Amino acid sequence: MRKSAITPTQKLFRAVPNGDGPNGDGMIKYYEEGNVWFHSHKWFRKIEGGDKMKSNISDEYLRHPAFFMSFSETVEGARSFDRGSESHTLFEVQNPIKLRDEIKNILLNHKFVKITWIKMEYGKTIEVGHELTPSEASERKYRQKPEKYRIEREWRLQILFCRSFRTINDTLKFRWGQDIWNLFEISRENFK
């Protein structure tokens, strides 16, 4: 498995929707209160404009359930695909390694989960020339996107469960409270 090349000093950006919060009060308010959500691949296939693949054999019976949160290396990448300043607030992660380690500390069983930064690769096509090995299928699912998404320059913070089980929810929720501001900050880019 490849190691990510992310560094503690690398800035990452995440655009958070101003509307559509769980209580109708906006995601930005929910985020500001220290609630951070990771989503499954199945969740992303459900949203409008998401992955067009309607189902996946592992949606219901996961070999290793994975949840992730996406970030971009650039402001432009975080703002791409209709995530403009009118509809989204831009957050910065000042220390990606610290964020990963904080999540690791919150999770009780370190042998049960693996938390990693994954750098996305671009060029994934619909057609595959041969039957994929399990390793190739995993690479394709967790690390590759079509070329049209290259502007995102995406990094995923992934929580991978090392045991097989059926998930009940497509969202994994963390509640940090005000301590979240040790990990995220509202980007100055919002005010330019």
Image: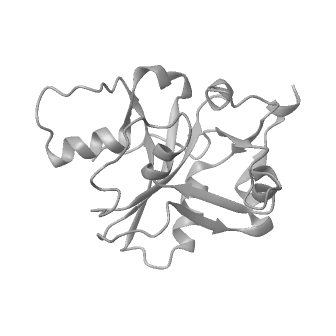
> Which corner quadrant of the image does residue 11 belong to?
top right
View extreme (left): residue = 130
Residue closer to the observer: 53 or 145: 53
Placement of the C terminus among the 4 image quadrants: top right
Residue at the image position 33 percent from the left and 62 percent from the top? 60
Task: Relative to 135, say whether 178 is above or below.
Answer: below
User: At x 33% / y 27%, what residue is drawn?
Assistant: 124
Task: Classify residue 7 as left or right of residue 53.
Answer: right
Give the percent coordinates (x, y) of residue 94.
Answer: 68, 46
Question: Horizontal placement of 127 versus 167: left or right?
Answer: left
Give the residue displayed 78% in from the left and 35% down from the top. Answer: 87
Left of 41 or right of it: where is 127?
Answer: left
The image quarter containing residue 78 is top right
Q: Is residue 29 above or below residue 113?
A: above
Residue 52 horizontal side relative to residue 82, left or right:
left
x and y percentages locating residue 191 in the rendered image: 88, 31
How many numbered circles are shown?
0
Position of residue 10 measured from the top left corner of the image (x, y, whole percent): 60, 39
User: Where residue 137 sits in the image (x, y, percent)?
Assistant: 23, 43
